[in-house]
Amino acid sequence: MHTALKKEQVLSELRHRLKSGEIPPGSKLKSGVELAREFQVSHITIRSVLRELSLSGELEVVHGRGTFATEARTSHHPPHLLVIRLGANVEYPGQYIMPEFVARTSELGGKVTEINVQFLRNNPTHAMVTRLRNAGYTGVLLDGDYYTGDEPELKILRRLGLPVLLGHAHREDVEITGFPGFGCSIARAWRAGLETLRQAGMKRVALLLCFSDGTTTSRGRTLEEHRNLLEECGADPDPELVQVCKNVSDPESGRSIGNALERLLARKERPEAIYCFSDFIALEVYRILKRKKLHIPDDVAVMGFCGYPGGALLKPPLATVDEDYAAIGRAAAEKLCAPEQWFHGSSPAVWQEIPYKICIRGSIRRKTENKQAEKATVIKTKNRKGL
């Protein structure tokens, strides 16, 4: 078995024994030789494991006496949760997860401290582990996704030995980091939005996508897979209906979105609907269409994605696929405030799916509704003539 894997297994088992009380607080551990024999690993592996547990504050090495389990934190202490923020752009999910997370933590008798990840990345690992341990935090919410596994904060949090959750994650993030997390099935949610437009009778649906730097997928699909998705959902499969623009965090996004819309609106058959990568992209589409004196949804329907607060206040209200950030915030707070129910050293990290919601609002309208409106207009016109 690979040495690194052996080390992780021994680390998980000893951590489980410490948390479960099998190794009572204050008790002395077996010697390094005895532990190496028990787990059938090298003395070097045992020394490395004991050092990790010592750095995380779970063990205390007393020179000349041995290694001891530190006193356990009693459960009556109120939760003190640390939030590590990775981004601050308006489209960043953490911006909308945090309000419910903080509110629910407060309801459960806890408090929240937020820091930017840069404060962790610019300090030595061992020193930061000690400082975080001494601060008395009971759990950590790591606000980010698309991890590579090499991020310095992951190394720190693994050594810290506290319960850690990913606040907005994909399955791959859980596998890479080893921490459990929450999120919705982005690829399935995106398809549901397209299917909603098709059910409303719209066939020529344009997709306005964004690809982050270094990524080959947008909303869980490659560019070619998005083109195939149009055909799978019974929409017009013309590949020119799939356009790419820069995200709103890019200074050139306004021009990029405008150019993509120009290409779509210049088509012989204008799209019946524009399905946007995010609600913020949809907001820019609203502005551009207004300048062009095109009306939503009469001239073209618009649908967003993410469910950011504010979309319902637009005129007309923005239809969207809501990832339910509020539900993620509440669920993360409840889990971190009761770690004894799930946090065990030997337990595998799991990804918990938060259901998405389809919000049908005024920016899309069923074709049948349009026909009924036209019929009503004709009746009114006839009545006027009769008068």
Image (cartoon, rainbow, N blue to C red):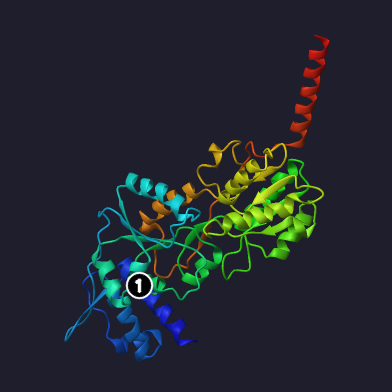
Which residue does the image show at 41% across and 51% down from the upper left? 98
Dot 1, how many residues are within 10 Å of its Cα: few (below 14), some (14-19), or many (20+)? many
- For the residue pair 78 and 303, the one nearer the viewer reads as 303
* Front one among 320 and 34: 320
Q: Nearer the viewer, residue 383 or 125?
A: 383
List x then y, in percent, for residue 50: 31, 81
Q: Is residue 256 left or right of residue 228?
A: left
Q: Residue at x 61, y 36 (%)?
A: 316
Which quarter of the picture shows residue 367? top right
Q: Which residue is mark 1?
A: 15
Residue 182 image position (x, y, % from top left): 50, 57
* Amino acid carrying mark 1 in the image: Arg
Quadrant of image for the C terminus: top right
Q: Residue at x 43, y 57 (%)?
A: 88
Of 40 and 340, the residue lying toward us: 340
Quick check: 95 above or below 61?
Answer: above
Left or right, residue 253 beside residue 339:
right
Which element type, helix, strand or loop, lies under badge 1? helix
- Residue 158: x and y, percent? 38, 72
